[in-house]
Amino acid sequence: MTPVWSQIANLGAALAFIIALKALSSPKSARLGNRIGAIGAIAAVAIVFFSESNLKHLPLILIAVVIGTLIGFVAARKVQMTQMPQMVALFNGVGGGAAMAVSAIEFLKIGTTAGFVALFATVFTIVIGSISFTGSIVTFLKLQELMTSRPVVLPLGRFITIGMASATLFMSVYLMIFPEIWAMWTLVGLSLIMGILFVLPVGGADVPIVISLLNAFTGLSVAASGYVLDNVLLLVAGTLVGASGTLLTQLMAKAMGRPLTSTLFGAFTAKATSAAGTAVDRPVKSAGPNDIAIMLTYASKVIIVPGYGLAVAQAQQTLRELVDLLISKGVEVEYAIHPVAGRMPGHMNVLLAEADVPYEQLKEMDEINSEFSNASVAVVVGANDVVNPSARTDKTSPIFGMPILNADQAEQVVFMKRSMRPGFAGVENELLFNDKTTLLFGDAKDSLSKVVAAVKSM
Amino acid sequence: MSVEIALLTIFILSIFVGFEVVSKVSTILHTPLMSGANAIHGVILVGAIIVTGHADNNLELGLGLVAVVLATINMIGGFVVTDRMLELFKSKKTNKSGDKK
């Protein structure tokens, strides 16, 4: 049994985590909250070196901690803000991997003598930790575009997944009845494959929700390993993350207008996306940077709708330059931020903040939607799905029900797009073919600098 | 009260606390909150250190050390990347108050 002082210190760390999560829910206290959490976690790690008796291999453990710290710190400092969602996914995955490894070792030690509940918790951590590990790696590959971001449906995918899920379930039960080592390793293997199969059919736009869900999974597996190790801190911390992560996942799904079940299993129910082939022949109106510059300079009110394409082109600074220029010419300009603009809820706010866009120019969807009807021009930069009117009207559309920005209600609409390719959700956007829509093709940064130059010369 | 029941009590109460603390979060903070929560489960490092410290053979030791490295990456990387995100929100706010004055 661990000494009393360390149990009390662990209580302190658990409290730090609760305060951290609470503080993270409010913009004012968020940063402080994160730091309180960090202090709690570091303190908890420091304590274990003193409270746990007879720790062997101390030098090796310390080296491992140093290596992990270096990798984690450098990766977190170096990552660009556009790539941050996949970084979070990766950090979450390695956490799941760690939980799985801890439980595997614990099984090797106590497997044959463990009680039923402890065995159940071990099996649970192995399965969920493994799924979180490989699942997060696949989400990372999808977001990093090292593999396609479209839903991947294997031939007979549904049967493979159901088969694998049954095998995993069977092996879990087997392991609880016959705690044998080969069965444990088989379960590890099956669960790792399950993680991949679980995430493959999820479409790119839904990946953030899956990251959040896997985050909750890792939390629960940490909680379960806390039970196995009789460690109250792990139990509390893991449960907190598991519960808050589950709620957060639901909140995100709601913000995107996607029921969780259709996010996870949507790709299995093969849906007929509006035929993209016919779209190519349809006429669109495109214009050069000069025409756009004139349109914007003589507008009374312009609303910018930034999307992920903007961030990919690293054009936030150029966009701000254009907006500043227009404001200096007396045009009223605001940004309309869709809750899921970027790749994660709140991501676009982070990206624009990085480009020093003043906070008061950023308007949330509920705030700005009624203003589109008063706007002379809505400029959609690198966004698509978040202004797709079919989310309002077309019941067969995969994004039906998703709250969208009412860009179509502005007098005129300008799209800065690289091509006619549909957005992340893979849905054709009717607004592109609307009479009041003008398209400016090209890389967002390129197009924006040309428009800036044109506005300047006027 | 047996240890099992005590742990179960803590588990259930923690679920409610977990739901409660994030119930009113604004959309802007979804990403930092997820990232912060992600860092908190990096505390599995404590578990990794305990099992590695009691490893009896090379398999357990090797697996344990891998777990320690992975858990540390989760914890340190998670907190640092969350801090970076929130730093941006901070600078926005100083801008705001600066503009007003």
Image (tube, coloured by chain):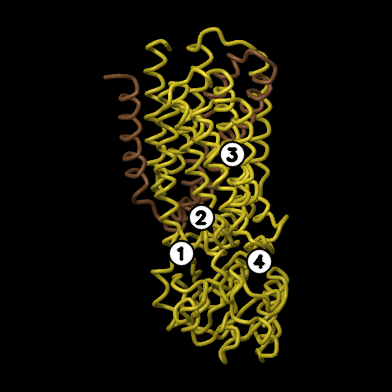
Chain colours: A yellow, B brown
Quickly name the residue at label 2.
Answer: A209
Q: Name the residue type under label 3.
A: Ser
Q: Name the residue type under label 1.
A: Arg
Q: Name the residue type under label 2.
A: Ile
For the residues bearing labels 2 and 4, Cβ distance under 8 angstroms: no
* Disc 4: CA contacts within 10 A as few (<14), some (14-19) or many (>=20): many
Chain letter, disc 4 residue: A
Real-space CA distance between mark 1 and mark 3, rounded to the nearest whole angstrom? 26 Å
Front label number (1 vs 4): 1
Residue A213 in the image, given as x and y percentages of width and height: 49, 49
Q: Name the residue type under label 4.
A: Thr
Image quadrant for the N terminus of chain A?
Answer: top left
For the residues bearing labels 1 and 3, Cβ distance under 8 angstroms: no
Looking at the rendered structure, the secondary structure element under dot 2 is helix
- Sequence-wise, which precedes: disc 2 or disc 4? 2
Chain letter, disc 1 residue: A
Real-space CA distance between mark 1 and mark 4, rounded to the nearest whole angstrom? 33 Å
Quickly name the residue at label 1.
Answer: A258
For the residues bearing labels 2 and 1, Cβ distance under 8 angstroms: yes
Quickly name the residue at label 4.
Answer: A318
